[in-house]
Image (tube, rainbow, N blue to C red):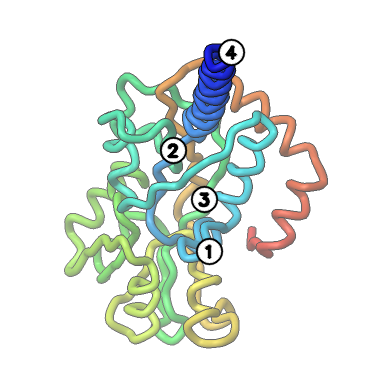
């Protein structure tokens, strides 16, 4: 009888151990399926770090959800997104431009475009006919603007009396509104969002938007080419849905 009870006890322990191993296996699989994604610091309305949301993050999260992947965002200065993935610290990097160092990475098709512009206060009455004209003015721009916006822009900024690139775009807007610089170079939707937040209402009617630059297409960088190709297909499908249309309407983008 004692021997039979011993066997039953051993069988129970073995069964419990097997269940625990199975649970651990499922848990590890779920963690392994979570994609870590590097993303540049706060860029509302595209990236709203404190809420882990924004147009860009909401869209990317929704696309990966259709693929069966939960995501986890890692916030870094804009210029470090590609550095992090190249070092193997994350699975995916957002907002990657082809002018950046992307050797060894698999780039998706363009998933988002930013409309950068040189923005000045109407009261300054500044007129520009070309990118080269910026060389005469003080400028604050987003991080890596001199890399992203091309050679003409880079040469003009080298001759500018004051040129700064800052990771905190709120400070860029503040510098323009306080008259500390002649121009802020940034995406028009980011400017509209931040200036509205700072002043309490839209400031677009009080500025001149000099559309000197074409839209900048951004890609996502993947370590896995297979995952990148699957993402491309899922992105095309998502952009045909009502969910995508509602997302664009939610953030009230300027064009």
Mark yes or no: residue 167 visible: yes
Question: In x, y percent, where is residue 127?
Answer: 42, 71
**Residues at marks 1 and 4, CA–CA distance in whole angstroms:** 59 Å
Q: Quadrant of residue 112?
A: top right
**Residues at marks 3 and 4, CA–CA distance in whole angstroms:** 73 Å
Please tell me the numbered disc located at residue 36: 2
Per the image, the residue denoted by label 3 is 114
In the rendered image, which quarter contains the N terminus? top right
Question: In x, y percent, where is residue 58?
Answer: 61, 51
Per the image, the residue denoted by label 1 is 51
Badge 1: few (under 14), some or many (20 or more) residues near its Cα, within 10 Å? Answer: few
Per the image, the residue denoted by label 4 is 4
Q: Quick one: SS at disc 3?
A: strand
**Residues at marks 2 and 4, CA–CA distance in whole angstroms:** 51 Å
Q: Is residue 246 above or below residue 62?
A: below
| Label 1 or label 4, whichever comes before in sequence order | 4
């Amino acid at each position: 009888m004692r021997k039979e009870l011993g066997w039953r006890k051993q069988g129970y322990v073995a069964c419990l151990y097997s269940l625990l191993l199975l649970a651990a296996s499922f848990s590890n699989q779920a963690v392994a399926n979570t994609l870590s994604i590097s993303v540049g610091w706060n860029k509302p309305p595209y990236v709203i770090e404190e809420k882990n949301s924004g147009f860009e993050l909401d869209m990317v999260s929704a696309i990966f959800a259709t693929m069966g992947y939960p995501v986890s965002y890692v916030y870094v200065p804009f210029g470090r997104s590609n550095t992090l993935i190249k070092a193997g610290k994350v699975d995916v990097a957002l907002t990657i431009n082809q002018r950046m160092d992307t050797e060894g990475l698999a780039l998706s098709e363009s998933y988002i475009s930013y409309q950068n512009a040189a923005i000045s206060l109407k009261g300054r009455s500044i007129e520009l006919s070309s990118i080269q004209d910026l060389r005469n003015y003080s400028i604050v721009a987003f991080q890596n603007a001199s890399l992203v916006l091309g050679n003409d822009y880079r040469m003009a900024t080298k001759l500018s009396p004051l040129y700064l690139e800052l990771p905190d775009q709120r400070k860029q807007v503040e510098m323009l509104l306080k008259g500390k610089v002649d121009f802020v170079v940034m995406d028009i939707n980011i400017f509209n969002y931040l200036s509205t937040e700072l002043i309490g209402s839209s400031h677009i009617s009080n500025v001149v938007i000099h559309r000197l630059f074409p839209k900048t297409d951004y890609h996502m960088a993947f370590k896995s080419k297979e995952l990148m190709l699957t993402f491309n297909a899922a992105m095309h499908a998502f952009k045909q849905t009502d969910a995508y249309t509602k997302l664009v309407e939610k953030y009230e983008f300027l064009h």
